[in-house]
Amino acid sequence: MTYTISQVAKKLNVTIYTIRYYDKEGLFPFLDRTASGNRIFKEQDIEWIDLICCLKSTGMQIKDIRTLIENCTLENAVLDKSLQMLMDHKKAVQKEIEEIYHKLETIDYKIKHLPEMYERIVNKPSN
């Protein structure tokens, strides 16, 4: 089964412009086109695009995504290098999650203690 760019955009909840931009940046060397130049997307292409969107939304730079894809699409795929890139990115995402979780704990603490802090300010004895 094949899909149009608008079907892929809808399926992945991204804009057509995002898909075109990623294509312009060389992130889709695997895409086929019709004789008139329209992109033809297969299920495997959609999985790659989903991965690209995931990596981009978690902070991986376009140039690094391009390198990863190039490594995976070489005739003699550079599997070790690609896996290392993904593992390094995973560590960075995990660190970011930990930092966000710590911030969430701080917010929860303030939510829990704000009423009593407010009470102390409002009922502060005057000198």
Image: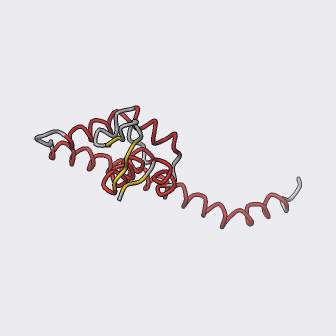
Judge from the rendering whether residue 72 lies leftward or rightward of residue 43; answer left or right.
left
Towards the viewer: 74 or 81: 74
User: On screen, 7 above or below 68?
Assistant: below
Measured as percent of width and height from the top left, residue 75 is found at: 13, 40
Q: What colour scheme does the image use?
A: secondary structure
Q: Residue at x 27, y 48 (%)?
A: 86
Towards the viewer: 50 or 35: 35
Q: Residue at x 46, y 38 (%)?
A: 20
Q: Residue furthest left?
A: 76
Q: In the picture, which quadrant includes the N terminus? A: bottom left
Asked where in the image residue 31 lies, by quadrant, the reply is: top left
Towards the viewer: 22 or 31: 31
Judge from the rendering whether residue 43 lies leftward or rightward of residue 107; answer left or right.
left
Towards the viewer: 118 or 13: 13
Judge from the rendering whether residue 104 lies leftward or rightward of residue 45; answer left or right.
right
Measured as percent of width and height from the top left, residue 59 is found at: 42, 43
Measured as percent of width and height from the top left, residue 21 is found at: 46, 35
Q: Residue furthest front?
A: 35
Asked where in the image residue 115 lies, by quadrant, the reply is: bottom right
How many numbered circles are shown?
Answer: 0
Measured as percent of width and height from the top left, residue 85 is found at: 25, 44
User: On screen, 95 above or below 20?
Assistant: below
Q: Residue furthest right?
A: 126
Q: Residue at x 67, y 63 (%)?
A: 111
